[in-house]
Amino acid sequence: MVEADFLQMHDLFSRGWTPKVKQTRSCSACSLRDLCLPELRKMKSAKAYIEERLKESGE
């Protein structure tokens, strides 16, 4: 099972493809949250993401 996951991971990496992420409640406590950023998948553009973050920080 580990070998199959390893081969799949390397196949995805070699093709430059990132699987879609389904955000769950556990995402907020995940150690990979800053790398995964599942909330980015919900945004229509980078501009929308930046504007949302600025709004949250009060800028």
Image: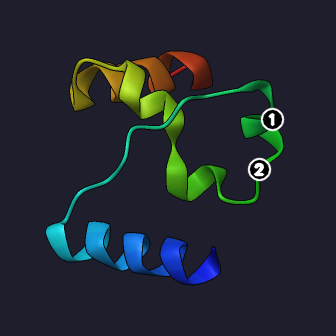
Left of 23 or right of it: where is 10?
left
Left of 5 or right of it: where is 50?
left
In the picture, the quarter occupied by the N terminus is bottom right
The residue tagged 2 is 30
What residue is drawn where x is 83% and y is 44%? Answer: 29
Q: Residues within 10 Å of mark 2 (few under 14, many from 20)?
A: few
Where is residue 22? Give x, y as percent. 54, 30
Name the colouring of the figure.
rainbow
Does residue 55 lie above or below 13 as drawn?
Answer: above
Q: Which mark is residue 46?
A: none
Camera-nearest residue between 57 and 52: 52
- How far apart marks 2 and 1 lie (CA) works out to 6 Å
Secondary structure under the numbered disc 2 in the rendered image? loop
Camera-nearest residue between 31 and 8: 8
Left of 53 or right of it: where is 8?
left
Q: Amino acid at mark 2?
A: Cys
Where is residue 9? Give x, y as percent. 41, 72
The residue tagged 1 is 26
Total numbered labels: 2
Where is residue 21? Give x, y as percent. 48, 37
What residue is drawn where x is 60% and y is 28%? Answer: 23
Q: Residues within 10 Å of mark 1 (few under 14, many from 20)?
A: few
Question: Are circles 2 and 1 on residues that touch, CB within 8 Å?
Answer: yes
Where is residue 56? Give x, y as percent. 59, 19
What residue is drawn where x is 72% and y is 38%? Answer: 27
Left of 59 or right of it: where is 56?
right
Does residue 44 lie above or below 18 as drawn?
Answer: above
What residue is drawn where x is 34% and y is 20%? Answer: 43
Q: Amino acid at mark 1?
A: Ser
